Image (cartoon, rainbow, N blue to C red):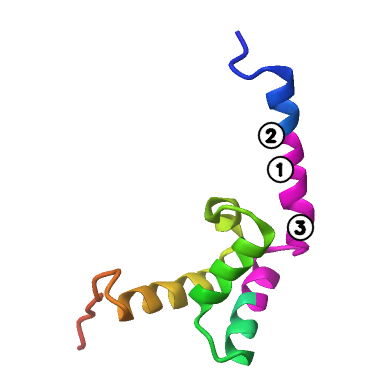
Amino acid sequence: MNVFSIVEQEDIHNKILSVSSSLLFKDAASFSQFIEQTAKNEDRTCTSVLVEYCDEKDIEFEQIAKLISPSLKGKLQKEFSDIGLLPEQHSLEM
């Protein structure tokens, strides 16, 4: 038994195609570089650039999760930690 009707399936498919075509990035590295470079050029946080990008493209954060490189993820974690949204991670010095 199919949970979604044909119309709902088409709507979901069209949204996926719309998101894919609106991203215009070939891989996670190019997307992350875009976010990081924009933040640097405009003296903004990566978080604010990412939020604005998703807002302008009318996409959810979950839809771009796979496009966030480890480098960008680290910067986002630091920004969140700096404003108190994530606990600071301590390392042991030897």
Residue 13 pos. (x, y %): 74, 35
Above or below — where is 44 with respect to 23? below
Residue stretch rendered in magenta on the structure: 12-34
Q: Which of 93 and 71 is in front in this view?
A: 71
Residue hosting label 3: 22
Q: Can residue 71 be seen in this view?
A: no
In the depicted structure, whether residue 19 falls above or below residue 38: above
Above/below status of 9 relative to 60: above
Residue 79: give x, y in percent of width and height: 39, 78
> Which image quadrant for residue 51?
bottom right
User: What residue is at 73 percent from the left and 22 percent from the top?
Assistant: 7
Residue that badge 1 annotates: 16
* Secondary element at image label 1: helix
Above or below: residue 92 compared with residue 80: below
* Residue type indicated by callout 1: Ile
Measure the C-alpha gap from mark 1 to mark 3: 10 Å
Circle 2 is placed at which residue position?
A: 12
The disc, 1 or 3, on the residue closer to the chain's N-terminal end is: 1
